[in-house]
Amino acid sequence: MKNRVSLLEIPKSYEPKEEKELYAFWEQGGYFTPSSSSKPPFSIVIPPPNVTGSLHMGHALNNTIQDILARFKRMQGFNVLWLPGTDHAGIATQNVVEKAIAKEGKKREDLGREEFLKNVWSWKKEYGNRIIEQLKRLGCSCDWTKLRFTMDEGLSRAVREVFVRLYNEGLIYRDNYIINWCPRCQTAISDIEVSYNEMDGFLYYIKYPLKECGMDYIVVATTRPETMLGDTAVAVNPDDERYKDLIGKMAILPLANREIPIIASSFVQMDFGTGALKITPAHDPNDFVIGKKHNLSPIKVIDERGMMNENAFSYRGLDRLEARKRIVEDLGNLIEKIEPYKYNLGHCYRCHSVIEPYLSKQWFVKMKPLAERGISCVLEKKTRFIPDNWEKIYLEWMGNIRDWCISRQIWWGHRIPVWYCQGMRNVECGVRNGIVVAIDTPEACPYCGCKELVQDNDVLDTWFSSALWPFSTMGWPEETSYLKTFYPTSVLVTGFDIIFFWVARMIMMGLKFMDDVPFRDVYIHGLIRTEEGKKMSKSSGNIIDPLLLIEKYGCDSLRLTLAAMCSAGRDILIKEERIEGYKHFMNKLWNAGRFILMNLDKSPISNLQSPIPKTLAEKWIFLRLSQVIKEVTNCLEEFSFNQASSSLYSFFWHEYCDWFIEIEKDELKKRKGEASYLLRESFCVILRLLHPFIPFITEKLWMMFKKQSIMASEWPKPFIEEDKDASQKMELVKEIVVKIRNTKAIMGIPNKSISCFIKSREFEGKDYIKRLANVELSFNETIEKPEKSVVLVASGIEIYLIMDIELEKQKQRLDKEIKTNSL
């Protein structure tokens, strides 16, 4: 790639056609790889996108923010590691491959586990890095030499190591419990993978006949009549006077004709329904707890497909919702009434199927012992949430944390490192229930020597491996140089929707296995929504494809739009018009650079080590440039991306271009060497400030000026102390020029030169006023208002514009404008 472009080759407008070439130049040049251990470290681990995914607007926002930080810190002199990778996305990836083989008329069971997994690995090899290439298209300066995958051998070993250690400490256990079961995905999912939606349903009041009581029946209220066939009790509150005499009596379960006890439980809410609660331990988490306390044997009536099973009598084989309809019909006059009822119904966050609370033997992690340190580290500010309102939400969730169901009934993923001895030939093996937990596949049972071992069929929840991401990707459990240098990482950038899926778990695992937090700062950004404020989804057909926007407007335009709209924690309402507007900014930047390049002195001053501003405008612009450097630096340090980008946009367009370049055009005629040098140096400072936000256009322009990559440049530092005198003088000049221009425009004479008197002694900047406002200027401290003049006031100074105006013509012109504008 050429380092220098001839002026004749500079297009008149910016066209982002060379972005891929520029990116390849950076990547091949090693600019993304950590450079020197002598520099202070700065590290980020990328939130690993699913291998099934393609770049969406959420990825674009999240990774633009990370790239801004990485490029900013490199320029500041940090040894930067931005570590990339992808997630194996257990359920999602398995679904994709199952759909593919279904087109051949096959199921995964037809292939068998080993052959099916070969298919998944083949799919991953062909399609799994698609999103990586898309991240490169976005300009992400990750160290691709360190690309990781959650199923890499190194990461897989870390997963097994963590499982074994937690198991040996009693923090992982296996038990029967009510879990969230997705009938569509055919697997358990954790509590936080369930999304709840308010639904319109019904509350069914059902009469349960009583055995040998003074009452004929007790009425229970339920939203799920189909589970009643699994009822093992009716519960009432012990303080409920209506039912005190019934506690200990027996009710007859309708349709099943089974006797069930009436028990007392303080869990029952007296004001819900009738105050009597049907207890179905196999199909409700709260009923499960009550059932365990009262030694009630659970009865499953719904299977893993969401169908009624053999315990459902004549309803066997019916879908649960169809069974509900039939059961209500068959209950007949045992239905007292049915009321409309709104309630929250759990759905699988992946496939949106209705979740079934399901009794199953699963593997769990005890979370409360791990959560204690996770709470302390945030309270002690070892990890900081930005914005800080997320801290309270995090702490509340951690304080009420439940055990984590980590087993999944799929084939793609980290298989649980547990084997079951089929022999159990001695007491010790029997005491352990034949369970062998090991990092490496055992050849024989370590307790009884039996070689008949069967590995657990389940795999671990995808989030289990993701929880280890900040340290497993750096080589843990080995004490690698990368771990020593870059752990803890500096910042995590993520959306609020995975604080509990991922962030909290990384904090707990990092503290447990690295004895330190995984990151110092957690920057939480909002979600990207449509301009109407709606969430983007395929089903709604309102998804905006960032790759199409990049093709249409260029990557830099999209990135600057996202940065300018990114306010911590707030959702972003994206409009294509905004992106188009920022493409105009790219053209403005390009044209300014082109103008300066075309006006460089053929023998530029080489002995100047720093800008030497002489005129008022030069002193002012370098003062403002110093102020902007401070402001943008502080904003980036505090994650105020919108403020930083907006400050740069406003300064460059409305001060540097609109004022300084226009003023320096005269200076180029008088002192081309110095003026072109100052233009070049000031513009190159602006390029460096803009580079983290818009890397491609700044690189291309920088190469034209400096003959090297901007990636090797340093972040600018303020170089001028405050100069209030120069600032006040220039601001007065600007105010006067703007007011004169506006008045002339209103009067319909914007291009006509007129006489102007300023009631003041002469001050610096008068030549700027003459030229920019197009006036014949005079100063007079004692002048009285001349005839046919318009009076303006700027900073307390009176200005008189001589305008020989024909009032009737002005009236006609204004009437015409009003009429035109009203059409």
Image (cartoon, rainbow, N blue to C red):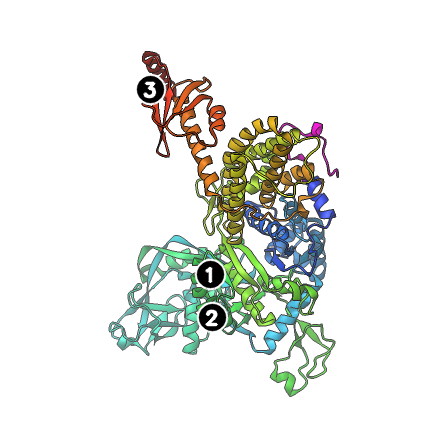
Q: Nearer the viewer, residue 466 or 743?
A: 743
* Residue type highlighted by circle 1: Tyr
Q: Nearer the viewer, residue 225 or 411?
A: 411
Residue occupying the point 47% across, 35% down:
730
Image depth: mark 2 or mark 1 in front: 2
Closer to the N terminus: mark 3 or mark 2? 2
* Residue neighbourhood size for the residue with mark 3, other residues' Cα within 10 Å, grouped as few (<14), some (14–19), many (≥20): few
Instruction: Tell me which secondary structure the magenta stretch mostly adopts.
Output: loop
Q: Is residue 28 above or below residue 588?
A: below
* Residue neighbourhood size for the residue with mark 1, other residues' Cα within 10 Å, grouped as few (<14), some (14–19), many (≥20): many
Q: Is residue 812 at least partly visible in the picture?
A: yes
* Residue type highlighted by circle 2: Ile
Image depth: mark 1 or mark 3 in front: 3
Q: Is residue 18 magenta?
A: yes
Query: Which circle marks residue 299 in the picture?
Result: 2
- Measure the C-alpha gap from mark 3 to mark 2: 101 Å
Q: Is residue 599 above or below residue 46?
A: above
Percent position (x, y) of residue 762?
A: 43, 29
* Residue neighbourhood size for the residue with mark 2, other residues' Cα within 10 Å, grouped as few (<14), some (14–19), many (≥20): some
Query: Which circle marks residue 315 in the picture?
Result: 1
Percent position (x, y) of residue 65?
A: 56, 49
Which residue matches tag 3?
A: 786
Helix, strand or loop at mark 3: loop
Q: Nearer the viewer, residue 395 or 719?
A: 719
Q: Is residue 14 above or below residue 428?
A: above
The magenta segment: 1-19
